[in-house]
Amino acid sequence: MTKVLVVDDDPDFVEIVSMVLRKEGYEIESAASGDEALKKMRASPPDILLLDVMMSTVLDGVNVSFAIAEDPQLKNVPIVMISSIPDSAHAEEFPTDEYVPISAWITKPVQPQELVKTVKRLVG
């Protein structure tokens, strides 16, 4: 079974995404911070990571994506960055001119069909 790690500090968002993906047959794990996500990934790498940008810090998700890219054990895990940053007061803090090592980007509010399509495209 394909394992998805959902990383977001909003428990309601995690629950909604988990329900949508479980219906499609995915196994779901969650983490509420970047640090927790990295610990879980190093213990048992998921097949794909759904990662919120803003958690304990504005760019927590971006920092996690760089840590994953630099880790030989984790660098091949596809990352789907999920955020409402384009619509937030923090939009100017996002490093748009920098390469961010992610596989896909989804904007909140997440449309269930877009989420499923993106996950299937990246891990089947």
Image: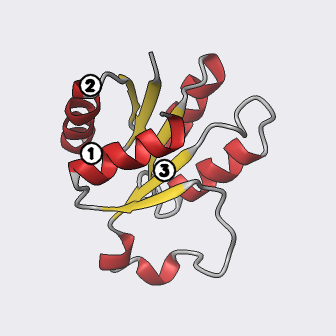
Few, some or many residues within 10 Å of mark 2 (<14, 14–19, 20+)? few
Of badges 2 and 1, the one in the foreground is 2
Residue 16 to residue 19: above or below = below
Can residue 88 be seen in this snapshot?
no
Which residue matches tag 3? 80
Which residue matches tag 2? 22
Q: Which residue type carries mark 3? A: Val
For the residues labelled 2 and 3, the Cα–Cα distance comes to: 17 Å
Name the residue located 31 percent from the left edge and 22 percent from the top edge: 25
Name the residue located 55 percent from the left edge and 29 percent from the top edge: 47
Q: Which mark is residue 10?
A: 1
Pointers 2 and 3 in contact (C-beta within 8 Å): no
Residue 86 to residue 30: above or below = below
12 sits to left or right of 108: left
Q: Which residue type carries mark 2? A: Arg
Q: Secondary structure at mark 2?
A: helix
Mark 2 or mark 1, earlier in chain: 1
